[in-house]
Image (cartoon, helix red, strand yellow):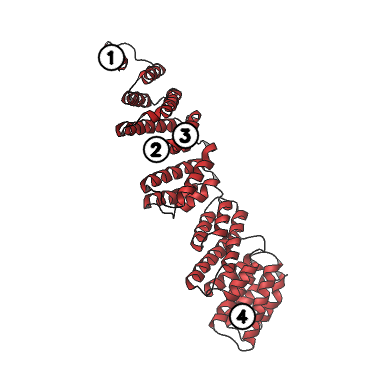
Amino acid sequence: MKRFAATLLALGLTAALGAPALAADEMTEVYRQIYLESVSLKDKYNAVKNLVALDDRSSAPILSEALQELLLAQNGYKDATERTLFGQTLRLLAEALGRLKYADSAPLLWTAAEEVPDPLAQAEAIIALGRMRALDYSERIALKLRNLNMGPTSDTDSGEKLAFACIVALDKFKDPQGFSPVFFASDGWYSLRVRKEAERVLPGLTADPTDPVIEIVTNEATGRKLKALQLEFGSSAPAQRKVAAATLAYSLGHLRADPNKPAEAKAYAELRKYSIRSLVVLRPQNADAVDSALRSYSGGYDVEEQLLALQLLGIIPGDEPAKALDLILRRLNEDVKNGVTDELKTRLGEAAVNAASVSKNPLLRPVLVMIANNQKWSGRIINAATTALKAYAP
C-alpha cells in the first residue's frame, strides 16, 4: 500500500512540476507494477480501473495477466465484501478485454464464464468472447444457452443474466449453430427482456438458417414450425434452400394435421397457406409441391387454401402440375356440363382457368377449348378460357 501511495504521489508531482506526460505504454507499465505489488483486493481493483481508463490496446496483455492472477487467487477471497469486489474487478477486466478484442484472453474468459460464482461476471465474460468473435467458443456458448432453455434455473435471475449474455454473444458470432438455441430462447421461460432480445437478434443471426429451420419444421409444434419458416423466408438463404424448407413445411402440414383436433387443424392450415404463398413468390422449378397442392385443392381447410393451391399449380413449370390442372379442369367442366354447379365451383373454375393461363403448358389447351365452348359456364369464365387460349396460339 505504501508503494502504491508513493507511486501515485510521484505521478502527481510530475504533473505539478510541468514535466512531460508519460507515454501511454509507460503509464501501462506503471499501473501493471501497481497491480502486481498490490496486496489488497481494493488496491488491485483501483489499479485495474486505471488501466482500463487508459483505453489503450497495449494494456490488453496486462489486463489478461491480471485476469489470470485474479482467477488463480479467487478461492482466497472469502467474505461477502471481498467476493463482491472480486466480481466487480473481474467484470471490469472482461469488459475491457472484449472491447479491446484481445483474443489471447479467450481461454481465461471461458474459465471465468464456467467457474466464477458471480453471474454478472460470468455474463460479462461470455459477452466479451462474443465481442472479440472468439469463434472457437461459439459451440460451447450455444450449448450453454440450450441447457439454460431447458427450464428455469434455481436462481432465475442468474439464469436470465447468463441467457441474455449468450444471446448477445451468439449474435456477434453470426454462426448458424447459434440459431436454434436463440430461437427457443425467444419463447422460453425467460422474462420479456430476454425473449425480446432473442427475437431481435434472430433475423440477423445467420444469413442462411435453412438447416436449423428444417430441423425445427420437422420436429417442433405447429406454431414453432410457422415461426421458423417465416424467419427462413425473410433470410438471405438461396432461393432453392427456401423452396426446400417451404415444400417440407407444406408436406408436413398435410401429414401431421389431425382433423379431429380443430385448433390443431387450423394451425396446420395456416402453416400450409404460408408455405403456398412463399412458394408462389419463390416460383419453384421442381414439381415437389404438386402432390401437396392437389391435397389442398381436394381437401383444404377452406376455400382460400384451395384457391392458393390452384395458383401454385399454375406457376410451377413442367408437365406434372399441368396434368394436375388438366384433371381438375376436366372434372369441373364435366360437373357444370351435367348441371352440377354452385358458387364454389364457379370460383374454383375461374381460379383454375387463370392458373392454366399462367402455366401456358400445351397440355392444357384441349381442356381450355372445352371450357370455352361449354355454354353452361358463366360468360366471365368462358371469356377467361378464350383469353387463356390466345397464349397457346401458334
Judged from this view, the residue extending furthest toward the right is: 394
Considering only vertical position in the picture, is 148 above or below 117?
A: below
Upstream in sequence: badge 3 or badge 4 = 3
Residue under circle 3?
111
The residue nearer to you, when weighing 149 against 40, is 40
Q: Where is residue 380 in the image (x, y as percent from the top left)?
A: 57, 79
Real-space CA distance between mark 2 and mark 1, rounded to the nearest whole angstrom: 36 Å
Q: Nearer the viewer, mark 2 or mark 4?
A: 2
Upstream in sequence: badge 2 or badge 3 = 3
Real-space CA distance between mark 1 and mark 4, rounded to the nearest whole angstrom: 99 Å
Q: Is residue 28 shown left or right of residue 299?
A: left
Upstream in sequence: badge 2 or badge 1 = 1
Residue under circle 4?
382
- Residue 115 lies in what quarter of the image? top left
Q: Position of residue 158 (x, y in %)?
A: 38, 44
The residue nearer to you, when weighing 270 against 394, is 270
Amino acid beneath label 1: Leu
Residue under circle 1?
9
Real-space CA distance between mark 2 and mark 4, rounded to the nearest whole angstrom: 77 Å
Q: Is residue 387 shown left or right of residue 187?
A: right
Helix, strand or loop at mark 3: helix
Amino acid beneath label 2: Pro
Real-space CA distance between mark 3 and mark 4, rounded to the nearest whole angstrom: 75 Å
Real-space CA distance between mark 1 and mark 3, rounded to the nearest whole angstrom: 37 Å
Q: Nearer the viewer, mark 1 or mark 3?
A: 3
Q: Nearer the viewer, mark 2 or mark 1?
A: 2
Amino acid beneath label 4: Ile
